Image (tube, helix red, strand yellow):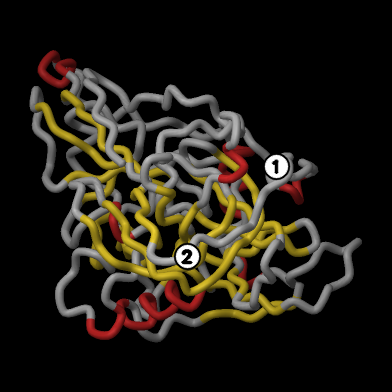
Amino acid sequence: MTHRTPQTSETPESGTPRHAAPDVTYPYYGQELPPQGDQPRDSASGVTLWAALVVITSFLVASVAWLGITSAQQPTPTAEERQEREQVQRPGENDGQTPDEPAMGYRVSSPQFALWAPGTKIQATDHYPQPGEAFTAQSCTVAFSFSGPDGRNYAVTAGHCGKEGDLVWPTYAETAADYSVEVGHYIYSGLYSENVGEIVDIDVGIIEITDSERYMDLVGKPIETALYSGDIPSGEKICKTGATTGFTCGDFEASGRTQIIRTDTNIERETYGDIAHVCALPGDSGGPVFYIIGGRASIIGVVSGTEAGRADEPCDAEGSATKMMSYSNYDQVMEVIDRVVPGVNWVGQTW
């Protein structure tokens, strides 16, 4: 599903009521799961058409770049914000539990280093925008990040959010200076890349992060990166985080479903993944899908799309509890990572 909004200086906010404020806290920060109401779990038969949840926005590089204001307008995090982000960048060093809560026996895996926290907001372009140029950018969300065996940093998002070589920027970028040096670039897309072998049409994308110092906007508080590979029973509660709707939850429906996804160019591609009764809107693509273990969020997948025809339906609309979200599951995500960045060292923990 595509949104095109004329802009002159900054990334727009969605006009859709948010399910969570920008400073949303996660369950283990003391928040109850958002109420979902009664949700029917009747599976639709056959192949379903899904809409990719990417926002395409029209921009005009700020004209102030021509007036001598050419320095990048990078936000400055507070000391507390910086500390919060640094505390979750080495999730593999945690013991997997809080002192007051004994482990429940769930095995999770974490990267040795995660530069960007789950829920980082990004936008992408296919070239370097120039002063005074009108261009479009795709806004999505990052599921998580990890470090490779070569010491480089990578991020995982949806495959339809960008093509190989597309440039990645902070969502606050607005001047020519902001767009002079990218924070990263796509090195793989499961929907667009060639020579993908047996992992064709998995809606997962990989970004190489090339600027580790740039501040990145984030949905809510930074959280640790921990992946869970266990089976999720039908009807179990799962959640997701996205740049547009924040933190929303619902019931898991089924896994391994073949589906048709309609990308931003209205091209239909066959893919497969898991589905759940969770509300998501354009801009949420690529965000982390969570299974809550003892009040902590473990990542089980990457947001892909929602039912075609309902992509713009607000999360507080009547009947929204029946809305379905598709996502690429743990096995698919790891299959892509193992091919694109082989040899990643994952650290096991018990939650």
User: Residue sitting at 50 percent across and 60 percent down?
Assistant: 44
- The alpha-carbon separation of the residues under discs 2 and 1 comes to 24 Å
The residue under label 2 is 45
User: Residue sitting at 28 percent across and 70 percent down?
Assistant: 201
- Callout 2 secondary element: loop
Q: Is residue 231 left or right of residue 260?
A: right
Of labels 2 and 1, the one closer to you? 2
User: Residue sitting at 9 percent across and 32 percent down?
Assistant: 130
Q: Amino acid at mark 1?
A: Gln
Image quadrant holding the C terminus, namely bottom right
Q: Is residue 302 left or right of residue 317?
A: left
The residue under label 1 is 36
Q: Report the front residue among 153 and 264.
A: 264
Q: Residues within 10 Å of mark 2 (few under 14, many from 20)?
A: few
In the rendered view, tell whether residue 1 sits above or below residue 134.
Answer: below
Q: Report the front residue among 165 and 196.
A: 196
- Callout 1 secondary element: loop
Q: Report the front residue among 78 and 110.
A: 110
Q: Residues within 10 Å of mark 1 (few under 14, many from 20)?
A: some
User: Residue sitting at 56 percent across and 39 percent down?
Assistant: 246
In which image quadrant can residue 36 be found?
top right
Q: Residue 205 placed where, x, y %?
A: 32, 63
Q: Is residue 173 left or right of residue 96?
A: left
Q: Amino acid at mark 2?
A: Ser
Image quadrant holding the N terminus, namely top left
In the rendered view, tell whether residue 253 sits above or below residue 83.
Answer: below
In the rendered view, tell whether residue 108 sits above or below residue 312.
Answer: below
Q: Residue 223 placed where, x, y %?
A: 62, 53
